[in-house]
Image (cartoon, grey):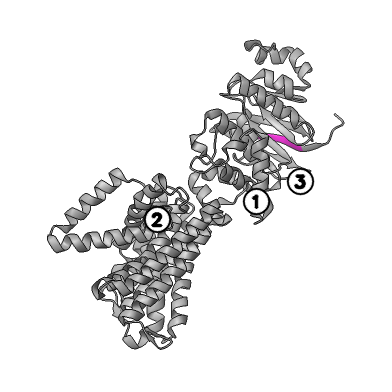
Amino acid sequence: MATVNILHTSGLTKTYAGIKANTDVDFELAQGKITALIGPNGAGKSTFVGMVSGRIEATRGQVFFEGKDISKLPAHKRIQLGIAYTFQITSVFPGLTLHENVALAARRAFRGDEAAVDAKVRTVLTRVGLGERANQIAGDQSYGHQRLLEIAMGFAQDPKVFILDEPTQGLAESEVQDFIQLMKSLAGEVTILLIEHNMTVVMETADHITVLDQGMVLANGTPSEIHENAAVQAAYLGTTDAED
Amino acid sequence: MTASRKSMGLHLGVLVVLAALFFILPPYHTGNMARIMVLAIYAMGYNFLFGYTGLLSLGHALFFAAGMYGFGMTVTQLGLPVPVAFAFGILAAAVVSLVIGLLALRTSGVAFMIVTLMFAQAGYLTILYFGEYTRGDEGFVIKQAQRTVAGIDLTSEAGRYGAAFILFAICFLLLARLVQSPFGRTLIAIRENEERTRMLGYDATRLKLQAIVVSGAVSGMGGATYALLFGYVGATFATVQYSIFPLLWVLLGGAGTTVGPLIGVLFMFYLIDISSSYTDAYMLIAGVVLVLLTMFAPQGLAGELRKRVMPWLP
């Protein structure tokens, strides 16, 4: 690949009480592209992005961001460098308004300029289609809207790398289509690492796919290469209907 | 904008009422109100940590006592001027809370409660151990001459009420402002979802430590004010009972609301005052009322108000 890597890992390994969740994962994230991380349940995808974002401490191995080794940095420092993370299980501030949820995400960058924060929040909420609901309480929203709120909280940080852990999980089909449109609208703007089970979403949005199986990298390639890959089919796609 | 204007109106309104009460109420009740305002300072300090940051401490008596002894001992034994000794009391509480915070924040949840409780017990025993200087259980009195600031006698009815009012008002307005600032809002975010806050790039541990220091300093100011206005310093104020009181006041009044602590102290003070004039079993009445309130207004009095009619209440 001729593209620049904004983030890469080297030998990233996580062992839980002797059980290896990730083994020597070497991974590259191309700048400005959407990279999908796929694999069967228990393949270690969430553990892997947990180690990248700093939520989970790696047993060994390194994470490099913009050429610097960030392996020793705590999670909040990595986020400050420009890595945003959305949770697999919706994790918003349920007692606060949507506006305040997104403002908390945006505020760090604006250093006390509340007017700029407000403007940013409005832009981001409108972009994900929640503009009308800004003053409603997050905990009162439908599941789909809370997922969108999560994504809005990611965007509000203007991240360099945006990690989305199963963003379409539990969404209705129409909401998934909206999500695909949203991802396409971001093409080239931000680097995205997408963990996704829904193959329609992956095939339609990803520029590049990395397949994990049993905590190890099984394959790398473009969507069509992965689609044709026999090993991947055996491990994963064979059990899922990958056709559109 | 309207929400912050309403909030400003409410806070100033509360202060106007408190100031007016001095001229309306008979002396017995103005004396009570002075005490209520001082205890409300302590409750507000507690509320900042419990109500806004979501950290339940069972050891705040340590901070209250640090302020009380920090002021009382320097003014009586070193003969420092009152304002200097008062500032020293607040500083002592801030330092103690910083040290306790650094240690206790290595834990969370129930462990945090136990650790703070144990440190406060250790603090209480320390006061007894150094009885030679602290006068232990017996405590010591601060003489009238040492309770005069700028010619104003704080043992007089008006002097005491005025001082309690001014110090209460300072804490009340500053804390109201603080909880609406980005710092305060981030603390609320930690209370709501600490992991999420961390994953938005905030250093949650450092913010919680800052919250403990603010809370400890305000609680200590409550202790110093108590000693200044009521003239007595004793180890009773460092007992576990004085760690439980602010929790009760804040729960009753409404945790995480700026007016909750004052309402809670006022309510509980008069609940006991009135019920004890009817029966010796006043604790039974107080207990039943507390149980009923917890059942029907679990968010406290101000918390219910916020839920039902005043969603803008900070």
Task: Give me the disc on residue B17.
Answer: none
Three-letter amino acid code at the position of disc 1: Arg
The residue at which mark 1 appears reads as A108
Report if the CB atoms under discs 2 and 3 are less than 8 Å apart. Answer: no
Distance in Å between CA atoms under marks 3 and 1: 22 Å
Q: Position of residue B111 (x, y in %)?
A: 41, 49
Name above or below for residue B208 compared with residue A179: below
Q: Nearer the viewer, residue B119 or A163?
A: A163
Dot 2 and dot 3 within a common chain: no
Q: Chain of mark 2?
A: B
Which label lies toward us, 3 or 1?
1
**Tag 1's secondary structure?**
helix
Which residue is found at the position 28% from the left and 73% from the top? B31
Q: Position of residue B96 (x, y in %)?
A: 45, 67
Name above or below for residue B265 compared with residue B128: above
Mark 2 surroundings: few (<14), some (14-19) or many (≥20) residues within 10 A: many
Quarter occupied by residue A101: top right
Name above or below for residue A166 compared with residue B311: above
Q: Does the magenta-highlighted stretch encompass residue A8?
A: yes
Task: Give me the disc on residue B57.
Answer: 2
Q: Nearer the viewer, residue A217 or A206?
A: A206
Q: Main secondary structure of the magenta part?
A: strand
Three-letter amino acid code at the position of disc 2: Ser
The residue at which mark 3 appears reads as A68
Which residue is found at the position 38% from the left and 52% from the top? B302
Report if the CB atoms under discs 1 and 2 are less than 8 Å apart. Answer: no
In this picture, which residue range is highlighted in magenta?
A7-13
**Tag 3's secondary structure?**
strand
Tell me the quarter of the image containing the N terminus of chain B. bottom right
**Tag 2's secondary structure?**
loop
Q: Chain of mark 3?
A: A
Which label lies toward us, 2 or 3?
2
